[in-house]
Amino acid sequence: MIYTNKKLEKYIPIANLIAKTFGKNCEVVIHDLSIPQNSVVYTINNHVTGRKVGQSFEHLVKDVLLSKKFDSDYHANYITTAEDGRKIKSSTALIRDSEDKVIGALCINYDLENLNNIRIFLDEFMAADQEKIETTVEPFDNVMEIVDDLIDKIIGTNKIEHLKRKDKIELISFMEKKGLFLIKGAIEKVAEKLDISKVTVYSYLDEIKKSSI
């Protein structure tokens, strides 16, 4: 290990702490920016990017200093790509001395490859057919028969001629919540069985939607 700037040595325990906390996929690098051609003075878990003591900095200018998100001497969570194509999430903070001059940088590089593999596995495992339900669905041959029976059961033993307006709205509201009106022809069936017009069914549905807002 090379320590050309003794002021940076106190950041080595911090680098070790970060690496130990987040594990082997987390690399931490300390740069001495007084020697830009050989700025890397400390690394831990350097298998992540291959950074070696004595190398120069990478990405500092383009991804950090010139970033619109660079603020308060740091830029967190930007993505870089390793030579072998792995995605690396990086964060960089500048280090200043007692005279407020920039003397170094502490960089965290996290290998996302394993997490990406887990994400792919979870996406595949949780995948399900996302069938879009149309506003009204053409029924299969026997569906309308089932819907017709459901409507009868919902109306039950109620005498249609004795049902008040609010009673019919309650029945239609229940049917709407259960999705019966997604079936093409259901509105006509309900209108027929409740002895009201199709227009009245639509107006009741509008009233139900407005009252639920």
Image (cartoon, grey):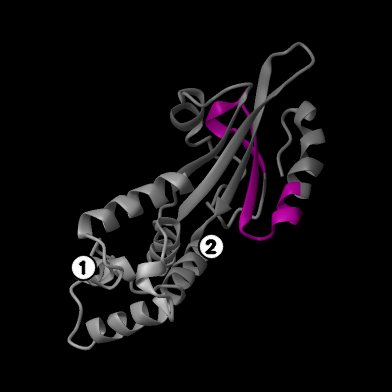
Residue 169 in percent (x, y) is at 41, 58
Q: Is residue 165 magenta?
A: no
Task: Please indicate whether residue 99 sits to the left or right of residue 36 in the image.
Answer: right
| Residue drawn at the location 60% of the way across and 26% of the way down | 35
| Residue drawn at the location 23% of the way across and 70% of the way down | 192
Q: Which residue is mark 1?
A: 188
Q: Is residue 172 visible?
A: yes
**Residue at the front extreme of this rendering:** 162
Q: Which mark is residue 115?
A: 2
Task: Please indicate whether residue 189 sits to the left or right of residue 208 in the image.
Answer: left
| Residue drawn at the location 72% of the way across and 13% of the way down | 100
| Residue drawn at the location 45% of the way across and 23% of the way down | 66
Q: Amino acid at mark 1?
A: Glu
The answer to whether residue 212 is above or below residue 66 is: below
**Residue at the top extreme of this rendering:** 99
Distance in Å between CA atoms under marks 2 and 1: 53 Å
Q: Is residue 19 magenta?
A: yes
| The quadrant where residue 55 appears | top right
- Which contiguous range is marked in magenta? 18-42
The answer to whether residue 61 is above or below residue 155 is: above
The answer to whether residue 84 is above or below residue 141 is: above
User: In the rendered structure, which disc, 2 or 1, sits on the residue that comes first in sequence?
Assistant: 2
Task: Please indicate whether residue 150 sits to the left or right of residue 93 in the image.
Answer: left
Q: Is residue 130 visible?
A: no
Label 2 sits on a secondary structure element that is helix
Residue 54 in percent (x, y) is at 59, 40
Residues 93 and 194: in front is: 194
Q: Amino acid at mark 2?
A: Leu
Residue 42 in percent (x, y) is at 68, 42
The answer to whether residue 126 is above or below residue 100 is: below
